[in-house]
Image (cartoon, rainbow, N blue to C red):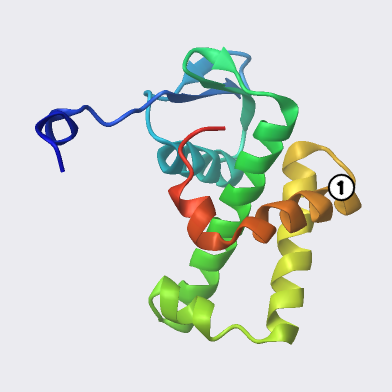
């Protein structure tokens, strides 16, 4: 690793903008993509909080990029819930998922994502299929839209 890489700042260009039930707006601190997913996971569980838009480097992300980010957040959220219920670390719980459980998880995550994004479940299913085709490791490492 070079000296410049060692001192380079971590890029945190993501920002999530929320609309509260009372009509006021709030924005997250700038962060990396996993941090933006965590903000979305919070918004999913917080009543009266709606994701208004997401920006990357100060510019709104496209609808497809927004759908990808929300679907990834729902997938991670559901996997964390499953691991917590089983009392296992996330990686162990994920490794123990068989084909039947995977189908159930996939359908539930599609249903949740469709509600958050206000899209048809079939479209949410397609988004998840596209995301999972990349692999979970690639999703976790992704930093740009």
Residue at the outermost front position: 2
- For disc 1, the neighbor class at 10 Å (few under 14, some 14 to 19, many from 20) is some
Residue 11 in the image, given as x and y percentages of width and height: 33, 28
Residue 36 location in percent, x, y? 47, 36
**Residue at the location (39% across, 35% down)?**
32
The part of the image, by quadrant, that contains residue 75 is bottom right
Report which residue position mark 1 lands on.
123
Left of 1 or right of it: where is 12?
right
Q: Residue 136's quadrant in the figure?
A: bottom right
Q: How many marks?
A: 1
Q: Quadrant of the N terminus?
A: top left
Q: Is residue 2 above or below residue 28?
A: below
Towards the viewer: 58 or 22: 58
Please give left or right for residue 108 compared with residue 42 in the image. Answer: right
Q: Which residue occupies 46% across, 44% down?
A: 38
- Quick one: SS at disc 1? helix
> Vertically, is 106 above or below 112?
below
Residue 141, image x, y percentages: 44, 49
Residue 65, placed above or below residue 111: above
Camera-side residue of 16 and 63? 63
Indicate the position of residue 4 as horizontal and vertical percent values.
15, 28
Q: Report the residue at 78% width, 45% height from top.
A: 115
In the figure, residue 132 lies in which quadrant? bottom right
Q: In which quarter of the image is the C terminus?
A: top right
């Amino acid at each position: 690793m070079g000296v410049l890489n060692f001192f380079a700042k971590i890029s945190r260009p993501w920002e999530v903008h929320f609309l509260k039930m009372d009509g006021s707006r709030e924005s997250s601190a700038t962060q990396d993509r996993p941090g933006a997913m965590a903000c979305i996971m919070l918004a999913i569980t917080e009543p009266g909080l709606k994701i208004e838009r997401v920006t990357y480097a100060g510019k709104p992300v496209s609808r497809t990029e927004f759908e990808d980010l929300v679907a990834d957040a729902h997938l991670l959220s559901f996997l964390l819930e499953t691991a917590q219920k089983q009392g296992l670390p996330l990686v162990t719980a994920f490794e123990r998922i068989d084909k039947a459980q995977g189908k159930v998880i996939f359908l539930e995550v599609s249903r949740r994502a469709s509600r958050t994004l206000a899209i048809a479940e079939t479209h949410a299913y397609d988004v998840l299929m596209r995301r999972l085709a990349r692999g979970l490791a690639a999703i976790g490492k992704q930093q740009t839209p």
